Image (spheres, rainbow, N blue to C red):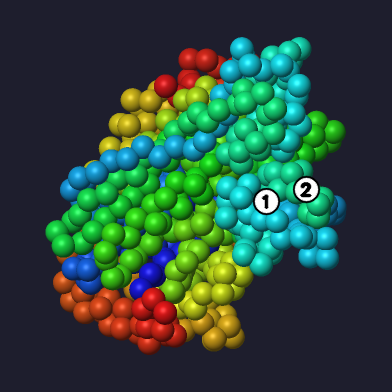
Amino acid sequence: MIRELVIVSGKGGTGKTSVTAAFASLAQNSVLCDADVDAADLHLLMAPVVRKKTDFMGGSLAEIRREDCVECDRCRELCRFEAISADYVVDPISCEGCGVCVDLCPEHAIDFPVQKCGEWFISDTRFGPMVHARLGIAEENSGKLVSLVRQETRKLAEERGFDLILTDGPPGIGCPVIASVGGAAALAIIVEPTVSGLHDMQRVAELAVHFKVPGLVCVNKFDLNLEMTEKVEAYGRSRNMTLLGRIPFDPIFTRAMIEGKNVMEYAPDSQAAAAINDVWGKVMAFPAMNVMGIKDFSSIIK
Amino acid sequence: MIISIASGKGGTGKTTVATNLALSLGKGTRLLDCDVEEPNAHLFLHPEITETEEVSTVIPIIDDALCTGCKKCAEICRFRALTVVGKKVLVFPELCHSCGGCMEVCPEGAVTEGKRQLGVMESGHCGELGFSQGRLRVGEAMSPPLIKKVQKNRNDASTIIIDAPPGTSCPVIAAMKGSDFVLMVTEPTPFGLHDLKLAVEAVKILGIPSGLIINRADIGDDRVVAYAKEEGLPILMEIPFDRKIAEAYSCGIPIVEAMPEWKNKFRSLYGRIEKLVPSGGQPQ
């Protein structure tokens, strides 16, 4: 059975990608998935060799054909996104792609071409295959692309006989995060011991409740504030999440990143590496990650 | 003058810069926390909230007594928020983008406006500093309409500081649009640089002048500095990695409170930004 571990944080910059990359060193028979399509960084540590590149076609955008437009102003009245200027030019950033103006223009003077919103890739890395993507700048539909990347990862794992997926999730609690969580065997929240880290973790945990997924908590940079670390862990327990352990603050994470390596490769004898090793052991021993794919209802986030 | 604080990568110090800049400027300034998925500025400012407003978006409500099951509403909906089963229209409110198409095309007048709650907007003040924030309802996917609402809450402040969400997609664009200046915050690491480049491209699309703050400037390498030179992106401030700053941050204490000498640094940062904005940030 394929088990997917999704790694999120709520707050950005808590170490999701660094920890995911370190897990990749320790995991057996796994596929990597970068679901942070908006600001993807995992590839910077993985040096993926792209084997297959596919365009991501998102929504359509309205385009007014000036030669056919009689300036009746109907489109401007209809548009709820203020996307059409007084001289009948559609602002592609404001256009929501609803097509209402396209369907209701009395002159049929508006085209609605499908847009390429990004690309997604199947790659090989030194830790096995990786599926990742690049959403175009200022684009919408990030949730759709996240869903696509996760589906393609699962398909690849099924076809090639991998039984573990490591998914590096996006920050926040909005559309791309909602698309990242459903169907995961377990959700690991990487938290930094700060007031923001705790606040944002609470919101992502509340979101996770809707999806009924088993939850894990790992405190990164725990020694920056022990009191906050304890608060984070207490909150995790109150939500029925399992504690994975604590990773110390260590500049070797940055140095490893500069070398394009994860911390297990760069400094295998460091305390940080030992802590991650322990954390990984607990992830794999978590009942919800069982190889039979039996859902563990006793450990879902409450 | 409207200044947006953006970054591409999360956790680089947007909220730190936004709150400390706002606190240093004080009177006549308003901070708008547009990171509505994870608003954090309030954790440092402890504002007194005096107004709370529910923000909602329009969704269709079908009057079954008038509906003939003609399917026109489902046909115009690009977001599959309406579907017709037999003669009955089913609405999936979470998929609705509030375009109003279904209401427009229904020949029977059977589609009327309902509401889906997006979140709340809270306003108040922190001493002389004005404050507003959006808080997205947990489970809501669409943040841009809430961000736009918060972004318009300018009252009579002469300086607006916008704390933007991370990334480069629609929520960030919604937060930055209409700003006079975008202040980008990064850290000098490969992740910081990679995501900074994306943010710079996004700002270029909007055509807004910008500058850079390098946070934890003494960790990492010099590639961010080299990139900024190449791009002609002015480096307006460097904040060192200082355990004292990191610990104050972890407890929700602004830098200017823990180390008051930073107040002047943030004020002179503002002075440098004023010189980089063509009209000085005054409405033309």
Q: Which mark is residue B122?
A: none
Between A277 and B275, the one lying in front of the other is B275
* Residue at 64% from the left image edge and 59% from the top image edge: A84
Q: Is residue B231 visible?
A: yes
Toward the viewer: A71 or A53? Answer: A71
Q: Residue at x 30, y 70 (%)?
A: B159
Residue indicated by mark 2: A106
Q: Quadrant of residue A237?
A: top left
Instruction: Indicate whether B183 appears above or below A139.
Output: below
Asked whether B177 or A69 is in front, the reply is A69
Task: Give the crowd class for mark 2: few <14, some 14-19, many >=20 residues within 10 Å.
Answer: some
Query: So how many labels did they put on this image?
Result: 2
Amino acid type, callout 1: Arg
Residue A30 visible to an observer of this rendering: no
In the rendered image, residue B254, in percent from the top left (x then y), is placed at 23, 61
Position of the N terminus of chain B, as image quadrant, is bottom left
| Image coords of residue B134 (percent x, y) | 37, 47
- Whether A146 is drawn above or below A298: the answer is below
Residue shown at 40% from the left, 57% from the top = B151
Task: Work out which quarter of the rendered image holds the C terminus of chain B and state it.
Answer: bottom left
Residue A74 badge = 1
Q: Residues within 10 Å of mark 1 (few under 14, many from 20)?
A: few
Residue B65: x, y in percent? 61, 12
Mark 1–mark 2 CB contact (< 8 Å): yes
Left or right of B62: which side holds B69?
Answer: right
Q: Is residue B46 left or right of residue B142?
A: left
- The chain ID associated with circle 2 is A
Query: Residue visible at 80% across and 34% down?
Result: A155
Amino acid, disc 2: Pro
Residue A11 vs residue A240, the one in the foreground: A11
